[in-house]
Image: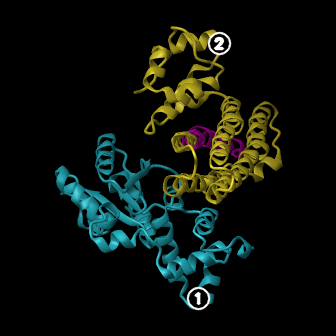
Chain colours: A yellow, B cyan
Amino acid sequence: MLIVGEMKLADVIHHDYNLVPVINRFDISLGFGDGTIKEICEERNVNIEFFLSILNTFHDVQYFPKDYLKSFPVSLIINYLRKAHSYYSDEKIPEIKLLISKLIRLSGKKNKTLNLISNFFNDYCKEFATHLMREETVVYPYILSLEKALAEKNENGIVDTELMKYSITTYEADHEDVEEKLFDMKSLIIKYLPLESSDNLMFEEISYSLLRELFVLEKELNEHSRIEDLILVPKVEGMEKHYKSDR
Amino acid sequence: MGALMNIILVENNFLLRSGIEGLIIELPGLLLKEVFDGKEKNLCRKLINKKPDVIIINPNALGDNFISIISKLQEEAGIILIGLLGNDCPENISSRFKNHLPLEGNKHLLLEKLRDACGKDAVYPTNKKTQAGSRLLSVREIDILREVVKGLTNQEIADKLFLSIHTVMTHRKNISKKLSIKTVSGLMVYALMNNIVDINEMG
């Protein structure tokens, strides 16, 4: 399904409820009423082209944003990505940690395997946090200053030599290991999670929730890096080309 | 069932993309990891970085870059290349592929070809020997795992156990396949869980 402005947002969510956290990042929460996407965006001052390209990229793996859709300012994309980051670190990861600690409590604390899995996930979280931190403290500021410098160059021809040394391509290949760890986490739970508890039914129920949360997180992160690869990186590459040419 | 075989598809035609996806879904053990349309910048590097087991390529999607890209991919050991080829595909292109899916083939034939190309065991672990063997690590693999989780490099393991580095790498690949665990820290959890190493041995 290609999502377009004339559709009712409610119909879109009926079709793909995974989009709920995405619309939340645009400060649209459930109970948004009966409007079309266009109406809701106008009402709330949301850039509709950007909104649509995010929804479509998230919804459809095959979707490829058209060039004219990339016309919105890069600060909008970064604002969105930052909100996504805090959703992962402030909501998703704590939820998963909570489920793990529930399992540990149920199994009476001396469950060796469960403790190992819990440590493994904590290590993953640290690595993930470092990765997000790098984007927020190095990559995004670089892009924002590039945007600013580009405007200044257009105005009075001044070029910042520091900016010329850096390039977005250096950061493109960076996602690998974090993804693999998340995959391993799922394997460990699917294949090796021991059932040692006085309340097995509860234990199974929580393990299932835990696994589901991991799959959801993985899906979210895949969409997230697709947005970076398909929208952010090409946009920044274009800006760099523009900035470094005809000095 | 062994670990999943990761597949990457390079195809720019939507109908063909969807068709191939439909085939892959029919075979448990195969997972379509990503689809490229062939026009991406630095496509070759991107493909190799994803560490796929299988790449299915329509030569038409690559256009003029076909020869340079396919040559580089052929140098990568451990990646199975499958061509999506029509009857009218010229010899100099079709000869680049050991395996191919014929565009004119019916579903049954295509599934069979895909299964054969990916290795039957990956898709249907039929004979008993591979089935039992693919679940448990061999004694040698356990030796290697023990050294991996201690943090030794492939070269150090090779020297210590008097093996070639290639043998060590093959063992490591098989270990990860059997356990569906890719990272060293994941393997460490497995090794501690199964008392293959002791927590005190860890560096």
> Separation of disc 2 and disc 1 at Cα?
66 Å
Quarter of the image for the C terminus of chain B: give it.
bottom right
Q: Please tell me which residue lies in front, A52 or B3.
A: B3
The answer as to whether the residues below labels 2 and 1 share one chain is no
Q: Chain of mark 2?
A: A
Picture layout, residue A164 above or below residue B135:
above
Provide residue A196's location: percent of width, then percent of height: 57, 53
> Which disc, if any, is residue B57?
none
Q: Quarter of the image holding residue B96?
A: bottom left
Label 2 packing within 10 angstroms: few (<14), some (14-19), many (20+): few
Magenta: main secondary structure = helix
Q: Amino acid at mark 2?
A: Arg
Q: Please tell me which residue lies in front, B86 or B19.
A: B19
**Can you tell which of label 2 and label 1 is closer to the viewer?**
1
Furthest-bottom residue in this view: B162
In the image, is A131 to the left or to the right of B84? Answer: right
Provide residue B172's location: percent of width, then percent of height: 52, 73
Disc 2 element: helix
Which residue is under mark 1? B161
Which residue is under mark 2? A44
Q: Amino acid at mark 1?
A: Leu
Q: Which residues are magenta?
A: A220-247
